[in-house]
Amino acid sequence: MKKKKQDSETKKISDLKKSQKDPSGKPLTTNQGLKVNDTNNSLKAGERGATLLEDFLLREKITNFDHERIPERIVHARGSGAHGYFELYESIEQYSKAGIFTDTKRKTPVFVRFSTVAGSKGSPDLARDVRGFAVKFYTEEGTWDLVGNNMPIFFIQDAMKFPDLVHSVKPEPNNEIPQAASAHDTFYDFVSHTTETLHNHIWAMSDRAIPRSFRMMEGFGIHTFRLINKKGEAHFVKFHWKPTLGVHSVTWEEAVKMNGADADFHRRDLWEAIDAGQYPEWELGIQIVPEEDEHKYDFDLLDPTKLIPEELVPVQKIGKMTLNRNPENFFAETEQVAFLPGHIVPGIDFTNDPLLQGRLFSYRDTQLSRLGSPNFHQIPINRPITETHNNQRDGHMQTEIPKGQTAYFPNTLGGGCPHLSKMAEGAFDSYEERIDAKKIRTRSDSFSDHFSQPALFYRSLADWEQEHVAGAYTFELGKCKQDHIKERMLWLINQIDEDLAKKVAEGLGMKVPKKIDQPINQAIGADADVKKHQPGKKKMYLDKAPALSMANTKFDSIATRQIAVLVADGFSMKNLKSTKKALENDGAMMKLIAPQGGTITCDENMEHKVDAAIMTTESVLFDAVYIPGGKKSVKELMKQAKFMKFVNEAFKHCKAIAADDEGEELLDATFVADHKDDTAVHINKKVEAFKKSIANHRNWDRRKVTDSIPV
Ligand code: HDD
């Protein structure tokens, strides 16, 4: 695929360039600029002698090395980042005065970091987990961070419970097992006693938790925020990111294999797509609720475990984000980037969502231990594109040189500077929300409906999605050792959906309990009024919310889909040429998989570079398979069982498969032989039909036969 020309650079990229260092053609020096003539040998007393303390070259090199690591993020440790920009379609000044939401001429630079939550920095990408979706907007009025996830709700309602949630899902503290997995006793001990988690939990059991690509997942700001217009009027808002490629996932069986075959699958996928000029894009959507409608819904807008169904409040698409540049250096950018929900600009404001309120504290605090100093905003990736001046001073790793005699306000000696700004000059002013309340440590009753939305989610899914949810619960609970925890979970799943509970119970070889011994949420606190905190009975304010199902996403593009082409010497160039042209024209990426690496020769005697030898790759890493004809080629392929396994796995995972001419003989040696009438199997058919099957992502109808396929 041709590499696209990079878009013109954003202000942030120009800013980062000031800090970049390019060693091309330059001598190796110490940190002090001293040229070095030997970086392989330490200074010794004699050829075989002891190393001397005097060796400042050795000490500088080793000291730096000894301190290379910084603490990984306590959550979201594993992540991948990219640069890009945001453009607004049309001004929404009726809602917000923010420059980013009113000026359609702007190209606001962004840096995005996608992540998994539970695993360590080196954990595999395809863990069943929520994905972080954090966006840093470098706006003209200061930096705005929208620190969201790929699911529209969160596990808990109050920041006070965050350490408990995280401690329960992280590896168990006695043996540090399991890595990057929620399938263990402590997590379900917590979940089964904390019913507010059930909504986010059922999303985590769905295929949303194993995305095909970061580029194919939605993002959500989750909390209800406020937009503030020039007149000072407020509207509630929820933020959505909608990927232009649609929302697609892999299956759990694939995910397990992918983690072994390519632990960096998502990271590589993002990097390679950007590198190939196939820039990932998301449209930014908003759901607006007028202040006077705050109490209109069956749920509380301040409760982060609830979404506003798009069927009740439509999502208006207001702009587009494009990621068009990979970082220059992982550590400097992706690792050191610090997102803070408290980074906000005029025109956007917070609400009293108790989870958001706690986050406003936590993120600044964590950077102090992660990045080591309150000056983390001076690190190139974190510094805003606007000038900053204030009277905050000193601290570890201060890299700026503030001039002048004064570092206080008010002053006359510094000419009153840095001076304050008026609202009209763009100063931030908190929304004047009236609060007339008692100081009280409690949870609002309006937060106590814990079953309605998980049930709505499950009802809204397609049958194949529901099957995957049942499979995920069965897998996860099957990994728990304690029966009483499984029983509680079954009882709770039964409150969400009886049919789902029955399926999971069958898989576990257990019965759905008719009652459980303790009231739900007993664990909420020794003195808490347990009765008050009982979740209410399931309500049904909407039969289905189609927007929640991935079956209703976009199926109109094959862009960036990875197509495995199985070939050996003598393959039909005519077949490959026409299929390749048709698929690559629409942005798909064809990879030649051959019995060995290096090159192979087609039937027109041309040499072709092999992308992967069969021993080095796996079927689960591809979206579709194509086998061109060529008698000699197919004969060679059939000598290696892994090619048949490759096809069988693609078939099992409901993917599109095409073969031309002798390519059919390879299919005859696989399970495809008995299913040539499958709508996503294309033998000597027009390439357009193959394309459509790839765009459809999977032929889920096939799963009725694939269950019996033993691969
Ligand atoms: Fe958080 C990181 C998303 C609740 C405390 N969080 C972090 C990241 C994302 C989120 C995407 C990674 C940012 C990056 O890439 O560097 N977190 C969320 C969402 C939440 C949420 C969507 C609920 C709606 N988080 C939450 C709570 C707390 C935290 C309630 C604490 C009270 N989160 C943190 C943290 C992290 C973090 C410990 C770890 C690294 C960091 O902040 O910079 O402070």
Image (spheres, grey):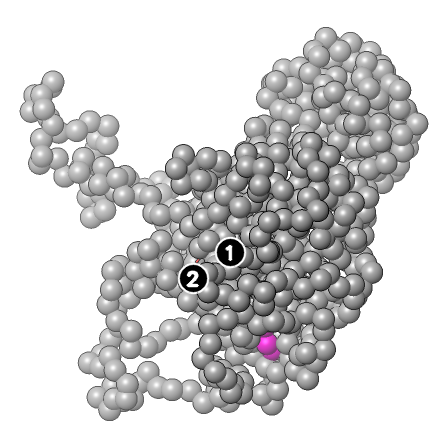
Q: Which dot marks residue 523?
A: 1
Which residue is nearer to you in this view: 329 or 173? 173
Q: Residue at x 70, y 55 (%)?
A: 454
Distance from mark 2 CB to nearest ligand 1 atom below 8 Å = yes
Indicate whether residue 200 is drawn in magenta.
no
Q: Quadrant of the C terminus?
A: top right
The one nearer the camera, 241 or 413, is 241
Q: Earlier in the sequence, mark 1 or mark 2?
A: 2
Quarter of the rendering containing residue 612: top right
Q: Quadrant of the N terminus?
A: top right
Mark 1 to mark 2: distance in Å? 27 Å
Which-is-in-front pick, marks 1 and 2? Answer: 1
In the rendering, at what x and y percent does residue 330 appear?
44, 46
Residue 643, picture quadrant: top right
Residue 502, position as x, y percentages in the image: 75, 41
Determine the main secondary structure of the stretch shown in magenta: strand
Q: Does 278 appear above or below 583?
A: below
- State the SS at label 1: helix
Left or right: 206, with 137 as reference point? right
Q: Residue at x 56, y 79 (%)?
A: 347
Magenta residues, as a range?
A: 223-227
Identity of the residue drawn at 58% across and 68% down: 532
Element at label 2: helix
Residue at image mark 2: 363
Amino acid under disc 1 = Ala
Farthest left residue in view: 45
As rendered, which of 217 and 3 lies closer to the eye?
A: 217
Q: Amino acid at mark 2?
A: Tyr
Question: In this image, 455 relative to 29: left or right?
Answer: right
Q: What x and y, as percent, mark residue 446?
A: 63, 71
Q: How many marks?
A: 2
